[in-house]
Amino acid sequence: MGIFKWLLLPFSLIYLIITNIRNVFYDKGFFKSYSFKTPTICVGNLSVGGTGKSPMIEHLIKLYKDDFNIAVLSRGYKRNTKGFIEVKEEMTATQVGDEPLQFKRKFKDIKVFVDTNRKNGIEQIEKQFPNTELILLDDAYQHRRVKADINILLTTYDNPFFKDFILPVGRLRESRKGKNRADVIIVTKCPENLSAEKIENIKKHINANESQYVLFSTITYDENIYSETDTLNLRGFDDFCLVTGIANPKPLIQHLKNQQKTFEHFKYPDHHNFTSTEIQNLKSINKPILTTEKDFTRLYQSIQHNIFYIPIEVKLDKELKPLLNIKPQ
């Protein structure tokens, strides 16, 4: 631990005490958690950002969209609106957040909503859309006013929660003991062909209880890239500018390098709201632009030509659906 992080340690201890007290109050019933008639699956993490929540939500949508009327509820991070809003395809990322807009554009037949107050969001969904049969909660692991039926906790292979520290020294939002609330723990962004020895070592450090499942997932990239009007095979796409505004672009960069692509990388912070100057600078580039699907939702309305995105999916080492046992009401 560097000297700067040692200086931050007292603040981490204060943060740890506060979050532990909050969790104890919920565990003991001093703070009330609310259950709902509609089955809910929560996807979240112990750390801040970059664990693969959006691909996991999309994976769950694909698993259940033929069985249930699905609604996705997110907070709509960095939106300039407030309250409960139903996401429409024609909206912008600044209105509803990039990830909720991505879900709606990709899965047009499902309902997507934003509300920072998850309890109010679920109440409004059940009131206004009573035919909803399953609610997916995006990034709601710490929102304990809602008692989800299933909690899925994500942690990355490169920076698992058991090696991390509480904010601001590390990236944990709460104690490592928070993993005990999970029904399923998924180690995300694993390398291909992870050895059985490595898997067992990670499971040992996670130390799951008898009722918890531990799964491992890898990222898979689409063979094609997409614009609003065109589809191209990545194999024939080269000499471009890569634009990312995500927490961890390293897997994408490595994938493109493995494909022997020539590109210049323009890196922005996670969920970055592009300024008009930045948009103009990107539009002035004389090369095609490749970006992530999440970034595309923030850029495609401003940069309408020669910009493409590459979708990703998660591949799990076990089938998830039988483990969750979600049944119609």
Image: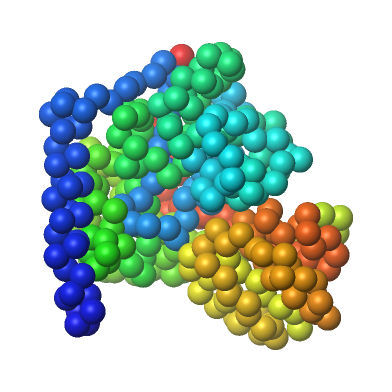
Residue 273 rendering spot, x and y as whole percentages: 61, 59
Q: Quadrant of residue 82?
A: top right
Residue in the image at 63% along x and 77% along y: 266
Position of residue 205 measured from the top left corner of the image (x, y, whole percent): 19, 61
Residue 135 appears at what percent x and percent y? 49, 29
Report the side of 197 relative to 115 (left or right).
Answer: left
Q: Is residue 263 above or below residue 138?
A: below
Residue at position x 76%, y 83% in the image = 239
Image position of 87 with respect to 227: above or below = above
Which image quarter holds the N terminus? bottom left
Choose top left, top right, bottom left or bottom right for residue 317.
bottom left
Residue at position x 45%, y 60% in the image: 50
Colouring convention used in this rendered image of the protein: rainbow
Horizontally, residue 326 falls left or right of residue 14, namely right
Q: Residue at x 62, y 56 (%)?
A: 294
Q: Is residue 160 in sight in this rendering?
A: no
